Amino acid sequence: MAVPLIWIAIILIILALIASLIGVRHIPAIISKSRIAKLILQNTTLGDRLSEIFYGIMMVSVVIGIINVVESGYVHVKNVLLIVAFGVNISWGIIDGATAVYGGLVDKAGEDRLVNSLRTDKENQAYKEEIEDILQSTIIRRLNEEDRSKVVDMIQAGTPEKVGKYSASIDDLKLFLAILLMDFITVFPVIIPIYVVDGARSAVFWSHFIAVLLFIMIGTLWARYLNKNMLLAGVAMGILGIGVIAFSFYFGW
């Protein structure tokens, strides 16, 4: 029996949504400007999205491999595979989202304490050097050494402030939801073929094919933004995906 067109459409829509999140151009506006896309795009960087979607695809691919659909009994495994795949990805989304939010708050608190220390002890060269190192990881790194030094001097010129409690804000909650959503949606294009394609081997083939296609896409886009060879990067990421899938599938239950 042929795969119903509705399921093909759903897979294509989700693939288009994922593509829009990782920088593929010319995605229909109804998808690229949807509420889910806007929430994720407005609260994460491109680097965050490429990494998180890579994690999500990797995890669901490994789950499908470990729970070997062909060897374990197709009908029986289908009953638990969806729960396991969502359980793994959602758990990772919660963990990654929470650590991103609270890790960011810890970093922010540390930076505020460092600024206060410099403003209190203005002659301490070690504090100035530490702030310069932190600035190296921001857009200010594009300034020359003299201008960066001026920025540190401007920070130093302020007066110490009382450091209060640090709590998650609405923006932090949006970041958490954006990360969780990315791990959630990456389950669908890889898991749907297991349930809509007839025959265990055909279903697993299409599941793995979509996963590898996404790996290649991610590798290509990573390379594009890093001015690397896009073809080599795409092939390398595709080989990595095939290797991980084959390894987990071979040693699956």
Image (cartoon, helix red, strand yellow):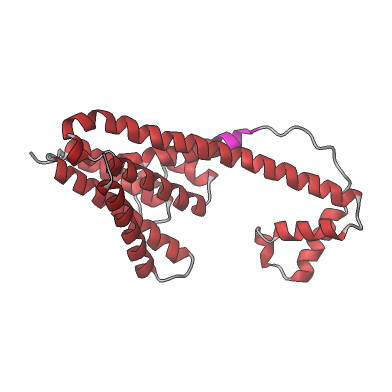
Quarter location, residue 124? bottom right
Residue nearer the viewer, 74 or 234: 74
- The kind of secondary structure the magenta stretch mainly shows is helix
Q: Quadrant of the C terminus?
A: top left
Q: Quadrant of the N terminus?
A: top left
Q: Magenta stretch: give its range.
A: 168-173
Residue drawn at x 49%, y 66% is 226
Residue nearer the viewer, 124 or 65: 65
In reply to whether residue 205 is colored magenta, the answer given is: no
Q: Is residue 106 above or below residue 134?
A: above
Residue drawn at x 78%, y 34% is 164
Residue nearer the viewer, 220 or 204: 204
Q: Residue 90 location, x and y as percent?
A: 42, 34
Residue nearer the viewer, 182 or 240: 240
Q: Count all numbered tags in the image, as a single digit.
A: 0
Horizontally, residue 111 falls left or right of residue 17, namely right
Q: Residue 56 location, x and y as percent?
A: 40, 44
Residue drawn at x 24%, y 46% is 207
Quarter location, residue 112? top right
Residue drawn at x 19%, y 48% is 205
